[in-house]
Amino acid sequence: MNEPQSHAEDCADILKQDLAAGRISRRDFVAALAALGAVSALPKRAGAQAGELVIANWGGDAVRHFGTAFGQVVEQKTGRKLTVDGGGPSMGRIRTMVQARNTVWDVCDSGAGDSLELGRLGMLEPIDYDIVDRNKMLPEFAYPHGCANYMFGVVLAYDRRRYGDNPPTRLADFWDLQKFPGRRLLRKQALAMLEMALIADGVPFEQIYPIDIDRALRKLRPLARDALFWANGTESQQHLRDGECSMGLIWHTRANLLKRETNGRIDWTFNQGILFPGIWIVPKGNPAGAKTAMEAIAAMQDPAAQVKLLELMGNGPANPAARELVPAELRSVDPGLAADRMLRSNGRWWGENTTIAEQKYADMIGT
Amino acid sequence: MRRSFGGTYWLLILPALVLMVAFYILPVLSVLVISVTEPEPGFGNYALLATSGPLHRVLATTARICVITTIVTLLLGYVVAYGLAHARPTMRGLIFFGVVLPLWVSVLVRAFSWVTILRREGLLNNALLEVGIIEEPLRLLFNEFAICIGMIHYMLPYAILPLYANMRGIDRRLISAARGLGASRPTAFRRVFLPLSLPGVISAGMLVFIFSLGFFVTPAILGGGRTRMIAEYMSWLILDRLYWGPGTMIATMLVLTVFALLWLLGRFVDLRRLFGTAT
């Protein structure tokens, strides 16, 4: 239960709750069941059916929503029917699959760090930037073995009830316990927390990487003494909703849910948040072939399809061209539109330093 | 147990024993062996016991929480067991029911119940605010205090039952004799009953302490992600960071500690009686 969770896993959780809370109609529910049933996570056949393209994500209704958003464009471009498998493309599963020469997924919803690690182990097809358009994503989010499929943020959320007419607007406020008293909520993993500490300490965006881990921890330590730490999205939402914490650094998708369910009592801002990409990767030996997988990724760069995903799940379009298509009511929740106010996460730095950073961070929490 | 029956009994438990060895003991050992093979053969992982600051802090936190839990559990458990041993049958039945009932409630449910009671806008804080005893909600949850409460709650039956078993065995006439010889009630308790109940206290204390070492869910929920005890640290090393060497080293040390404590316990009390096998 307290395993650290990735953003994609959390999206699946959110959608499960939507279903339970009746925010999804019965017809949709039946359709979702069918979708889930059709793509059982069990190791089924040894390879996809001919004429199929299999995307793996983290389950729940994300299965259905990926299908709704991307089904058509993928079929148009590749002539293959899109199947979404919610089996959870973790590093371990992909590694096992590739090593057993039994890859059943064509394209997987992963993260920058995993793509670098799996790429280094030779488990992934390199992204073919002759087919996938490098210009349809932020330049920072095009990696050798993975490229952006959507974007999300870690943002500053706060309790309006506590701060009234003078709410916090930047990370320095998050660190200012005099002006903004109240318990803070931080993530249990170092990712994004170190960057945010440095931003609050006055480091300009372009000088954050390479991260000075010790400086960030010095900044974090006084806050951490009294803070709570979330390991998964549900927890982050719960601590702010219950008033245990009056300010927190959490995923924008959760912040948005909080704002909705508390009628605006919990509010949030993209300002000085950290922008992350969800990353498409293609495991070695994928059933449809590497070229087809690249074509599918290229097809899913379609702005309208990406806006559809924003509408369904809150995940922001990776393609900057989609910005103009975002409808008025969603403009405030699209991380892409706020990209210039946010720091773009550097997956390469984290790929090389995760272990030492996480170790020092965890130790800081304990002291 | 007479010798001639011994052989037959051993045959009867042989299948179970083989199963245990094949499917439990051997796999566990093969995991523990990793502690001397990864990342390189040798005792490098064990050197961490002396050198690793984070490990020292986790061990200190674990020891502190386990000792506090054990002491408070013993104090509370002693009172209840004393009451049980001296209650009339009907009353005793009721108390027993109350003691044993929580054993059927999952540890997860109990931890979340404490969240409901202790949180900022929870039952306790709201009640205190209503009555006007406090002006600001108290910080009762997400700290070591909350962890201790959750663990003590969980461990109480494990203290009460051995204590009660021991107290039932104390000859009540000894107290009467002490009283008859002029001892006051407190003196009779302090000089006669208490010393006679010490084996119960020691075995209950050991049981509670050993159980406390392995707590995982309760600290995770009631600690708010702030407090890391040994079980969570192990899981973090092994599942999250894939540091199997250090993780299994800690597991090995934990197993050895438990065995050492059991051995120590065996020097004070009859283990077979404690675990209910003696006739």
Image (spheres, coloured by chain):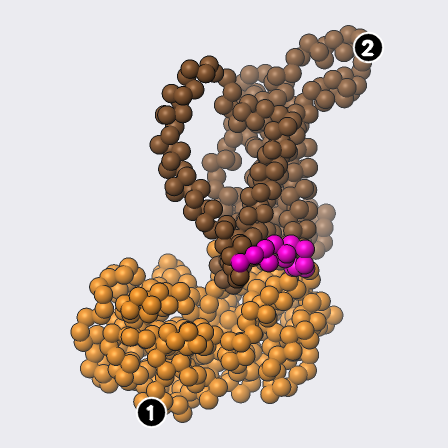
Chain colours: A orange, B brown
Q: Residues within 10 Å of mark 2 (few under 14, many from 20)?
A: few
Residue A167, compared with residue B163, is above or below; it is below
> Is residue B183 shown left or right of residue B44?
right
Q: Nearer the viewer, residue B213 or B259?
A: B259
Residue under label 2: B182
Q: Which amino acid type is marked by label 2?
A: Gly
Q: Nearer the viewer, residue A302 or A254?
A: A302
> Is residue B6 shown left or right of residue B148?
left
Residue B87, compared with residue A46, is above or below; it is above
- Image mark 1: chain: A
Question: Which residue is at 51% across, 20% downward?
Answer: B278
Residue under label 1: A130
Residue B215 located within the stretch drawn in magenta = no
Q: Which residues are magenta?
A: B41-54
Would you identify the image quadrant in which residue A42 lies? bottom left
Looking at this view, name the residue that lies furthest to the right. Answer: B182
How far apart are the alpha carbons under marks 1 and 2?
100 Å
Identify the main secondary structure in magenta.
helix
Question: Which residue is at 61% across, 38% downward?
Answer: B260
Asked if disc 1 and disc 2 are in contact, CB closer than 8 Å, the reply is no
